[in-house]
Amino acid sequence: MDYIYEHEMKVRDYECDMQGVVNNANYLHYFEVARHEFLETKQVNFHWLHERGIDLMVARVDIRYKYSLKGGDRFVIKLLIRREGIRLIVHHDLYTLSDERLCTQCTTEIIALKHGRLTNGAIFDTLFAEELNKNAL
């Protein structure tokens, strides 16, 4: 796949449960970090958007766990995006760096509010024009 962004991370020991694997809730944090870091590559962050009355919010998350990460594992999250109506759909694939094993897949639906009101999502076209056009080809 032709991903639009990749972000590398490492599992910290405190993210693991008694079984020695990453607790399922921590994957949400990993995916959020990757989305925030991607947004910053556009020279934008959530604070900057909020100051302009725009809030991007998660409307839905679907995670598919395939293989558990363990303490110390290094991994990469790779992103794809597409527009679907008023929503921005972000697809995350999480791979271990050591053997490039697909561990987890996540789809996150994002909506945009402007001054507290749901928008038609035009901000996504503005922020991610290059990436959305690339996916349309």
Image (cartoon, rainbow, N blue to C red):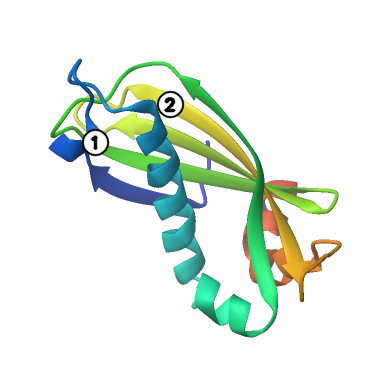
Tell me: 13 left or right of 132: left
Residue 104 marker:
2
As shown in the figure, which amino acid type bears the numbered disc 2? Thr
Query: Percent from the top left, x then y, of residue 63?
Result: 53, 27
Query: Which of the two labelled residues, at mark 2 and mark 1, occupies the earlier sequence position?
Result: 1
Q: Residues within 10 Å of mark 1 (few under 14, many from 20)?
A: some
Q: Nearer the viewer, mark 2 or mark 1?
A: 1
As shown in the figure, which amino acid type bears the numbered disc 1? Glu
| On screen, residue 80 above or below 95 | below
Q: Is residue 137 something one can see in this rendering?
A: no
Query: Percent from the top left, x then y, of residue 28?
Result: 45, 40
Name the residue located 23 percent from the left edge and 22 percent from the top edge.
21
Q: Secondary structure at mark 1?
A: helix
Name the residue located 34 percent from the left edge and 31 percent from the top edge.
95
Q: Is residue 14 something one can see in this rendering?
A: yes
Residue that mark 1 sits on = 15
The CA distance from mark 2 to mark 1 is 16 Å
The quarter of the displayed image where residue 24 is located: top left
Name the residue located 26 percent from the left edge and 25 percent from the top edge.
69
The quarter of the displayed image where residue 120 is located: bottom right
Query: Percent from the top left, x then y, of residue 74?
Result: 20, 37
Q: Residues within 10 Å of mark 2 (few under 14, many from 20)?
A: some
